[in-house]
Image: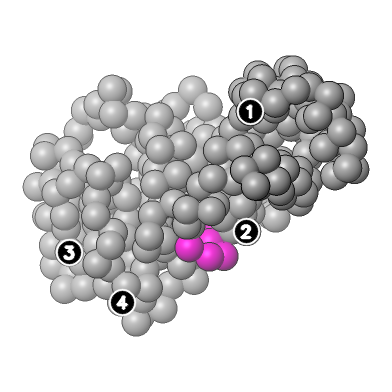
Amino acid sequence: MSNDRFGPKKRFGPKKKFRPKKKWGQNFLASEKILQKLVASAQIKPMDTVVEIGAGTGNLTFFLAQTRAKILAIEKDWELLERLRKRVGRFKNVKIISADARFFDFEDIKDYKVVGNIPYNITSFILRRLITQKNPPQTIVLTIQKEVANRLISEPGSSQRGLLTILVQMAGDVQKVIEVGRENFNPVPKVDSAIIKIIPRAKWGAEQEKFFKFIKIGFSAKRRQIVNNLASGLAINKKIIYNMLEQAKINPLSRAEDLAIDNWKKIYAIVKKQNVKKQN
């Protein structure tokens, strides 16, 4: 992980003024240096297909187009679509799509990467959607709120660790590329950002979803001990859960945030085995 915190080098964007919609979390990345870093982090080749989430004013789209890859630029704001067409319409490798990225159908796109400067308020939804769909991207590179980026890379025992951390770390390798100061955006948001990169390892299936739901029970009351959360959530006697945790070599008095994914796998396997015995 780089410790660089990039500040503005050159303001980049359309000259004609546009009033961003606060309700949609529109804060456009306006530093040429960081836009180029965002593109470079995705390691895009000319034969790649890249889906850009929230193309906005085309600041990022412009640099994505230079890679000569096939760019699918998604934008839902009709006011921005015409600006986007004027800005990047001349690039034959750019296709502008009028759609809400939250509900965009990725199923028919083969071997694609996702890059974007997304609104903070849809980060969790977008990450879960990208990771758990049948056709996940090969690479995900996004600018998100710094606080959320820190949660995604947090280690067991950190108070920042939560369900979104587990979801992302279950699905792939995640890194914080660089931190990005708020002064690099237009309008300037109240918080700083960071570029994250996720490389999904495998497709998300039914078994992964069951496992995640099990972990969700463990996080149901974050400040409670895991033995209590699992006992109440699974409707299993607390003593039995206590013994299962000891069998998995997990301290029953631990909290959910203390456990690594391998710890969760151990206790999940034991609980599943006990349930099978009951059914037989």
How far apart in space, not on screen, are marks 4 and 2 (Cα)?
27 Å
State whether residue 37 appears in this view: no
The count of marks equals 4
Q: Amino acid at mark 4?
A: Arg
- The residue labelled by disc 2 is 173
Q: Where in the figure is residue 52, as x and y percent of width and height?
A: 32, 56
Mark 2 Cα shell of 10 Å, populated few (<14), some (14-19), many (≥20): some
Q: How many angstroms separate mark 2 from mark 1 (CA)?
A: 30 Å
- Tell us which disc is closer to us: 1 or 3: 1
* Label disc, if present, on residue 202 of the rendered structure: none
Dot 4 or dot 2, earlier in sequence: 4
**Decide: marks 3, 2 in contact (CB < 8 A)?**
no
- Front of the two marks 4 and 1: 1
Q: Residue 68: which disc? A: 4
Q: Amino acid at mark 1?
A: Leu
Residue 232 percent location from the top left of the image: 66, 20
Q: Amino acid at mark 3?
A: Lys
Which residue is denoted by mark 3 in the rendering? 95
Residue 114 is left or right of residue 147, and the answer is left
Nearest to N terminus: mark 3 or mark 2:
3
Residue 109 shown left or right of residue 151 in the figure? left
* Residue underneath mark 1: 234
The segment highlighted magenta reads 198-203
Q: Earlier in the sequence, mark 1 or mark 3?
A: 3
Secondary structure beneath dot 2 equals: strand
Residue drawn at the location 28% of the way across and 62% of the way down:
107
Q: Secondary structure at mark 1?
A: helix
Question: At which x and y percent is residue 75?
Answer: 21, 46
Quadrant in which residue 17 is drawn: top left
Q: Residues within 10 Å of mark 1 (few under 14, many from 20)?
A: some
